[in-house]
Image: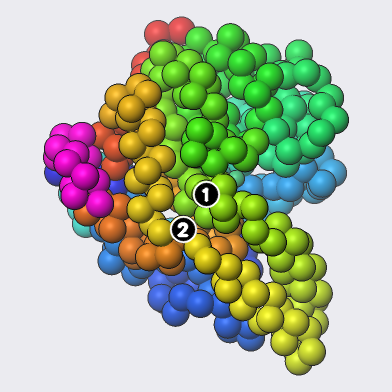
């Protein structure tokens, strides 16, 4: 039986904005009825999803104390949502626990942390987040931080992983915390491979060979990740999937949307701001989107490089403003499975891609920690 796992969604952001994941919300951005989400528990069930990593995302722009506070706020939001829906979901920290949850008819919620800022420069904080259930650490996000450089800024701070970052990697290995290389710079990636004794993951990244964005991984990186036993989980964001889409005016429209959203969040009764926000969403959605089949093209590419054991799915839902055509929310994720079948993948291969590969790495990282 397939265990369908999504290794990255930003849904905790929606939970703290007030979304009720026990209630399904119609897809499509409706200002005034915000938040409208790509994910909720009914949509996950409809999509046949058995488990998801909910990302505890903090912006690199926060001060250290603000980022730690924000991380607790987001974790608390996820704890609340799980507690309020005991008939639908349950926490998981291991593949074995997730499989038991599935037997009991429950979807598993895992925690990951996107950006290491909340641990500040204190490994005891890393250990506390692990104790709270966090099972992967994305070392940074769109800025260079105390741990390593990000792929986003032109100016790098460390030229890879910092001396403190090296300690973080060693502690993650010791604890059994997965290290996530999505968002980090190429130099940081190569340092992580050098310093980490356990396999590492890219929880939501695509292939540079098919879409040349710096957030994506080169063939050389994918081969090295696989050689170390790791896995790349394909992101659904159209601009990471497709060069043509990335060359459109989407980036300018994203900026306009962010500003409009920020203004409207502060003054939700302002009709003019609401109209600006609606227009920015309509403009973004007017750009021709790649099909959901493009996600499978990226899977095919990884398979052609390193075989079926090193690829999976990391949607980035609720963290992206547009989606591929036909993959508008998590309820439609079965289309990817159907497309894999159509392209001739065997059932055991689909099982590996759907979640088996990521679980194998989780178990390997835990085994490594137990043996340390
Ligand atoms: Zn991300």
* Mark linked to residue 242: 1
Residue 312 at x, y percent in the picture:
37, 38
Residue 285 seen: yes
- What SS does tag 2 mark? loop
Residue 69 at x, y percent in the picture:
73, 49
Residue at 66%, 82% in the rendered image: 278
Q: Is residue 350 magenta?
A: yes
Which picture quadrant has residue 212? top right
The magenta stretch spans which residues?
339-351
Residue at 48%, 16% in the rendered image: 224
Which picture quadrant has residue 282? bottom right
Residue 15 seen: no
Instruction: Give the vertical position of 30 relative to 74 (above or below).
Output: below
Residue at 65%, 36% in the rendered image: 214
Between 226 and 57, the one lying in front of the other is 226
Residue 41 at x, y percent in the picture:
38, 65
Q: Earlier in the sequence, mark 1 or mark 2?
A: 1
Instruction: Give the vertical position of 24 relative to 196 (above or below).
Output: below
- Using a 10 Å C-alpha cutoff, classify the residue at mark 2 as few (fewer than 14 neighbours), some (14 to 19) or many (20 or more): many
* Mark linked to residue 290: 2
Instruction: Give the vertical position of 147 relative to 19 (above or below).
Output: above
Marks 1 and 2 in Cβ contact (< 8 Å): yes
State the quadrant of the N terminus: top left
Whether disc 1's CB lies below 8 Å from ligand 1 is answered no
CA gap, disc 1 to disc 2? 7 Å
Q: Which quarter is ligand 1 in?
A: top right
């Amino acid at each position: 039986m397939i265990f369908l796992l999504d290794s990255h969604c930003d849904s905790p952001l929606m939970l703290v904005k007030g979304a009720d994941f026990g209630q399904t919300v119609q897809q499509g951005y409706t200002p005034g009825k915000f938040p409208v989400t790509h994910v909720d528990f009914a949509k996950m069930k409809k999509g046949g999803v058995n488990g998801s990593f909910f990302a505890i995302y903090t912006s690199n722009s926060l001060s250290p104390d603000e980022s730690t506070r924000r991380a607790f706020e987001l974790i608390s939001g996820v704890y609340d949502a799980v507690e309020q829906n005991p008939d639908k979901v349950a926490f998981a920290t291991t593949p074995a626990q997730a499989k038991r949850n599935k037997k009991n008819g429950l979807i598993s919620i895992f925690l990951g942390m996107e950006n290491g800022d909340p641990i500040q420069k204190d490994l005891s904080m890393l250990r506390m987040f692990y104790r709270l259930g966090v099972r992967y650490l994305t070392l940074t996000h769109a800025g260079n931080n105390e741990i390593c450089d990000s792929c986003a800024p032109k100016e790098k701070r460390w030229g890879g992983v910092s001396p403190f970052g090296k300690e973080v990697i060693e502690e993650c290995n010791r604890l059994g915390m997965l290290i996530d290389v999505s968002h980090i710079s190429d130099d940081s990636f190569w340092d992580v491979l050098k310093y980490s004794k356990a396999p590492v993951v890219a929880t939501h990244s695509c292939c540079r060979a098919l879409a040349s964005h710096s957030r994506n991984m080169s063939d050389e990186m994918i081969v090295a990740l696989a050689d170390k036993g790791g896995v790349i989980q394909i992101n659904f964001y159209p601009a990471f999937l497709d060069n043509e889409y990335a060359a459109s005016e989407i980036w300018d429209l994203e900026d306009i949307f962010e500003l409009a959203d920020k203004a409207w969040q502060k003054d939700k009764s302002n009709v003019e701001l609401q109209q600006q926000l609606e227009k920015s969403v309509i403009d973004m959605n007017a750009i021709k989107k790649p099909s959901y089949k493009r996600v499978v093209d990226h899977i095919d590419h990884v398979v052609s490089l390193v075989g079926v054991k090193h690829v999976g799915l990391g949607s980035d839902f609720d963290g992206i403003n547009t989606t591929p055509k036909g993959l508008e929310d998590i309820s439609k994720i079965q289309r990817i499975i159907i497309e894999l079948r159509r392209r001739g993948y065997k059932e055991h291969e689909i099982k590996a891609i759907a979640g088996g590969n990521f679980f194998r790495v989780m178990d390997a990282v835990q085994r490594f920690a137990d043996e340390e």
